[in-house]
Image (tube, rainbow, N blue to C red):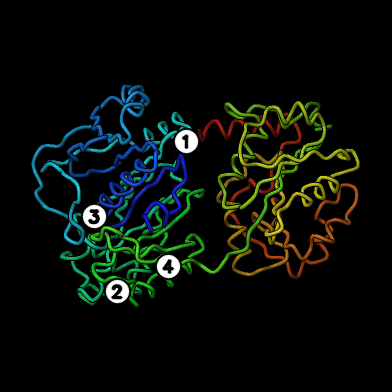
Amino acid sequence: MQINEALKIQRGDVVSFVGAGGKTTTAMRLADELSAAGQRVIFTTTTKIMEPIPREGEYLFVSDDPDRMLARVPELLARYPRVILAHHRLEGSDAGIEEDVGYPFPVRTNKVKGIAAKTVDQLARQLMGRAVILVEADGAKHRSLKAPAPHEPVVPASTTLLVLMASLHVLGKPLSAEYVFRPELVAALSETALGEPVTIDTVAAVLTHPQGGLKGAPAQARVVPILNQWAGETASAEAREVAELLLRSERIERVVIASLRRADPVLDVVEARSRPKVAAIVLAAGASTRYGQPKQLLPVGDKTMLQYVVDVVLASPVDQTIVVLGHRASEIGATLKDGPADIVTNEEWEAGLSTSVQAGLRAVRPDAQAALFVLADQPAITPEIIAALLGRYQETGAPIVVPTYQGKRGNPALFDRSLFAELMKVQDDQGGRQLIDVYGDKTEKVEVGSEAVLVDVDTETDYHRFKETHDQLT
C-alpha cells in the first residue's frame, strides 16, 4: 500500500506534517506517489528544511515576494508535476541527515526558509483543488519525538489533513535531548520524568495532547498519525499498542504504521471502531417575515448568509450536509455554490418549521446515526461548536445533545436516530423543542463558552451587531 492510499489523500487536500521522525521524507515520497498518479503537487514548508535539489519533473521556486509566487505557481504547475516553494535560502550548512530515516532524495547542505501560512491559504483558495499542497509545518532537529514550543507548529488554516509523526525508535530510550526535541515539554505533557525511558504511553500522550500533536489542528482537518517503525517486515506489537491508545482520541480515525526506509513503507493501517455518522440539516426554508426580506441572502463578507452557514457546517466533522429550502427556493438555491451539500425543497414550508425538519430527515442517509439541526440565521456558529456537540454524542450516545452558554440552552441541536420517528410527528413551528422538554433528563448539555449558540438574526439590529463582530474578527 502506498502512503497516499493509507492517508486517503483527496484531490485538493492541504496536508500539513507535524511532530518528528520523517516529515520531509514522507512529504517527498507522497509527492512522488501523487505525481505518478497524475496529480499536480506543491511541496513547501512554514518552517525550515534542507534545500532539495530538483529532480526530473520538479521545480524549486524561491521568492520572498508572495504576490510574485502566487502569480507564478499556476504557470509552473502547468509545466512541472511537482513544484517546491521556499521564501529564501539560509546561510550556513547543516550536513546532518535525519537519523532514523535518511533522505531518499538529493539535498544541499544549506536550508531554506519556508513561506507564510497565510500564503499557503491563499494558494489553496487560488488553486481550488487543482493540486495537492504538502506542508512541513514543524521542525524537530532530526529527533524521534517532540512537543511544540509556544510558537510551534505553524499549521495553515486551510489544512484539510494533519499528519502527526513520531519515530518508534525512541521507545525505551531515555527522555533526553539526544532522542527527543524539547524533552522538558514532552515530560510535562506526558508526565514522564526526564531521563526515564520513553514508553508507548509517553508517545501516545504527546501526540494526542491539545498542546502536543493536536496543537493548532484546524477543526475541519482530518487527523492521521504516522508511526515510523525503525525496522521489521510487519507492524510491531509496540506500534499496535501505541495505535490503539491514539485511537482513543475523538480526532483520530486511523493510524498508519510505516517503515519509511522500505520501498513499500506502509506496514499496517489501524482504524478506529466506527464512530457514529451524523447528518447536519440546515433549516433555510422560512420567509424571514420579521426581517422583511430573505435573511438567507444577506451578505456576510463575500458570501450570502446561507452560504456562510453552509460552509461552516461543511468545515465541521459532520458526514452529510443537507440544506432545506422553501420560500423563494429557486432564487435562494441559485446562490449556493456547487458542493457536497444535498439541497432539498420543502413545498410545505408555510405549514411551519416542523415540515422542514421532516423534509431534512427524509434526506438523511441510512447509515447516519443522528441528525444535527442548524438554523440558517445563526451565522456565528463555528465548526468548533459543532465538533464539541458531535464529540459529546460520540462519548455518551445520548438521544439529544444541545449547546449551552452560561446555562442557557441554544442551537444547533442533535437528535439520535431513535427519535427520528417522533420528530416526524411534530407539528407547526415546534421543531425539536417538544422532544427536548420530554427527554430533558436524558439530554446532554455542552457548555460551549460562546454566545453564538443563543444568537440568531431576526432583525436589522441583530444583523448589524453580528456584522460588526464578524468584520472585527476578519
Mark 1 and mark 3 in contact? Answer it, CB < 8 Å.
no
Mark 4 Cα shell of 10 Å, populated few (<14), some (14-19), many (≥20): many
In-image side of 257 versus 452 (left or right) = left
Residue kind at label 4, given as amino acid type? Leu
Residue at the disc numbered 2: 192
Disc number lying in front (2 or 1): 1
Disc number lying in front (2 or 4): 4
Residue 39 occupies quadrant: top left
Mark 4 and mark 1 in contact? Answer it, CB < 8 Å.
no
In-image side of 175 versus 473 (left or right) = left
Give the residue drawn at x 75%, y 49%: 363
Give the residue drawn at x 37%, y 69%: 204
In-image side of 291 versus 71 (left or right) = right
Q: CA distance from mark 4 to mark 1?
A: 30 Å
Give the residue drawn at x 35%, y 38%: 41
User: Secondary structure beneath disc 1?
Assistant: loop
Is 244 situated above or below 75?
Answer: below
Residue 178 occupies quadrant: bottom left
Q: CA distance from mark 1 to mark 3?
A: 30 Å
Mark 1 Cα shell of 10 Å, populated few (<14), some (14-19), many (≥20): some
Mark 2 Cα shell of 10 Å, populated few (<14), some (14-19), many (≥20): some
Residue at the disc numbered 1: 129
Mark 3 Cα shell of 10 Å, populated few (<14), some (14-19), many (≥20): many
Whichever of labels 4 and 3 marks the residue nearer the N terminus, that label is 3
Q: CA distance from mark 3 to mark 2?
A: 19 Å
Disc number lying in front (4 or 1): 1
Whichever of labels 4 and 1 marks the residue nearer the N terminus, that label is 1
Disc number lying in front (3 or 2): 3
User: Secondary structure beneath disc 2?
Assistant: loop
Residue kind at label 2, given as amino acid type? Thr
